[in-house]
Image (cartoon, coloured by chain):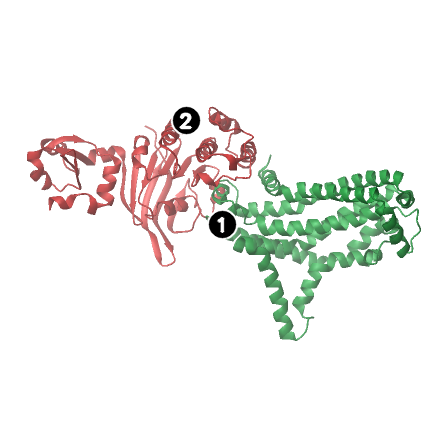
Amino acid sequence: MSAVMSLLKKEYIEHKAAFLYVPGILILLLLLAFSTAVWRNGANLHLMNGASEMGLPLGGIDIFNVLYAMSILGWTAYLTLMLFFFFASSFSSDRKNNALLFWKSLPVSDLNIMGAKTLAGLTVFPIVILIWSFVGAVVGFVAISLASLVSPVIGQLNSGINIWTTLNLEVSAVIFMVVTLLWYTPLFAFVGFLGTLVRSWAVPSFILILVMLSGLEAIVVFGDDGPISRLLDQRFNAPFKSLESVMPGVGNGMPESIHSIVSVGNFVPAYLAQLDWLGMVLGWLVAGLFIYLASEYRRRRLAA
Amino acid sequence: MTATRNIVEVKGLSKKFGAMEVLHDIDFSIPQGRIYGLIGHNGAGKTTAINALLGLTDYQGSVRVLGLEPYQNRADLMRDVAFISDVASLPRFLKVSELLDLLEGIHPNFSQSRALELLEGTDIRLGTTIKALSKGMLAQLHLATVMAIDAKLLVLDEPTLGLDITFRKKFYRRLLEDYMNEDRSILITTHQVDEIEFLLSDLIFIRQGKIVLDASMQDIAQRYVQVSVREENIEDAGKKNPIYLTKVLGQSIMIFDGLPEDEAGELGTTATPSVSDLFVALMEPESAGIGALQ
């Protein structure tokens, strides 16, 4: 096992609770809630009302894939949030654990350790969450299929299921998650850098700095459309704006034909074409700078 | 006789924290195959000096460890240097087996099988989480991991702090029997100087950031002499400038620096002073009892 793989494994062991255990608990809770809804017959009523309000026919909708598509957005949001806290915490976790001197006794530079933390955040944990999203899909498929047997409305809604759509959805989900994480990398690196400086105050500091920057700018330019505000707005919202622009149904309730918009051949080129690739590359350079600065600060630290 | 090279070479090492200078232009070297004791009071500069050797802090002056400048080359240096600065620094969220696996992956000179051999006979189980280990077990585990590294220099900064006497004795005996060989050097700091005296080949006393003594135990035995002075010789002995005076069970004990053996023998029974007595004599002259003679 190489040094990098060992360091990735260390990060996985240290932070696996948020990525390995909590998603499993969430899936169990959702399954329990769904089972309770079916058992109480509430699911029939809500689905009938929901389909009626959206003007959808009760049948041939492929409810499974629609719910799976929505769950992917949920998993992406969960992953992004957890990674934000992972970066805020992991860059200073060796100091908090009083283990800094142990890691410094090993033939690995501080930059390599910080790089391994970043790599773990952008590879190991997203893979774990993707696996959970697939597990959730299988569990959801089984649950909906079983519920179809006892619930007439679910049975009607589930009649149009299309496995080919599911496969397209999975590939599109991977592309969407990867692009989202790469776009947010400078924000992760920034909160990680703050974590090395102020440890548990990283998240409040992150919020305070960004709010103050845009607030001060708003005072100076007497408005909210200054370059900093625009930059932050773009950095926070671009992946979802790009998604909306190629999947108009996302922002407007349940799409009627999910297959047409999640088809890999349609979605991936359209989505990638919407992205600001210059902003992406500049973001990575900024992220690299923050990681380097964090490693240099860590190099100068001896203890908590 | 084979020539030994210096593992550590320090020239003009100084270190400031703000306006306060804690190391003042110190020089020393550590040849291959030696066990050095770096002894001093709290705040004397021992840990700062060690941190400079390990590349953990910047400094002024010249430091070379295995030919490398430590601060810019810490990661490379750690292939051949092992250290324990704090036995409580093992990552507590890992299981023992996970720790050994990680070390095997990260450290090219770490041998997991050697670590497992060293852990045989202890109460440490591989499936135990490190945070569940007692302080003694933590020290045993940390020592086993560093002893499983094929290093050229081992640095131990207060490795047995807070541990009981039985464990401390075992710790040092094992270090000598299972680890030390002519290719390796060890640098130890501790407050329990008497406990490491038997394993030291050389001694450095540091006081207020300056080296007060840097000598081999052999040279110390030749240079310093402890005399249990006969009653009738006390006045004569006092005129020969003892550096240390104490009374044990009514018997006057004095330590002399550079007193010829025959002259010392005329004053009473001679012996080599213990490290702790020499420490008091050289580091705390004001409490070395010399005033009683004046």
Residue A168, placed above or below residue A202: above
Nearer-the-camera pick, B210 or B232: B232
| Residue A207 tag number | none
Residue B106 x %, y %: 55, 37
Residue A202 x %, y %: 57, 55
**Mark 1 — residue?**
A299
Q: Quadrant of residue B261?
A: top left
Residue B208 x %, y %: 30, 50
The quadrant of the rendering that contains the N terminus of chain A is top right
As drawn, the residue found furthest toward the front would be A40
Mark 1 to mark 2 CA distance (whole Å): 33 Å
Q: How many marks?
A: 2
Write the residue at 78% across / 58% down. Answer: A242
User: Dot 1: within a 10 Å radius of its alpha carbon, few (fewer than 14), some, or many (20 or more) residues?
Assistant: many
Residue A148, placed above or below residue A88: above
Write the residue at 68% across / 56% down. Answer: A281
User: Dot 2: within a 10 Å radius of its alpha carbon, few (fewer than 14), some, or many (20 or more) residues?
Assistant: few
- Tag 2 subunit: B
Nearer-the-camera pick, A37 or A103: A37
**In this rendering, would B227 be left or right of A49?**
left
Residue A289 visible, this orientation: no
**In this rendering, would B282 be left or right of B25?**
left
Q: Amino acid at mark 1?
A: Arg
Residue B121, placed above or below residue B100: above
Chain in green (letter): A
From the image, state the color of chain B: red
Q: Amino acid at mark 2?
A: Asp
- Tag 1 subunit: A
Residue B86 visible, this orientation: yes
**Mark 2 — residue?**
B178
Residue B181, placed above or below residue B106: above
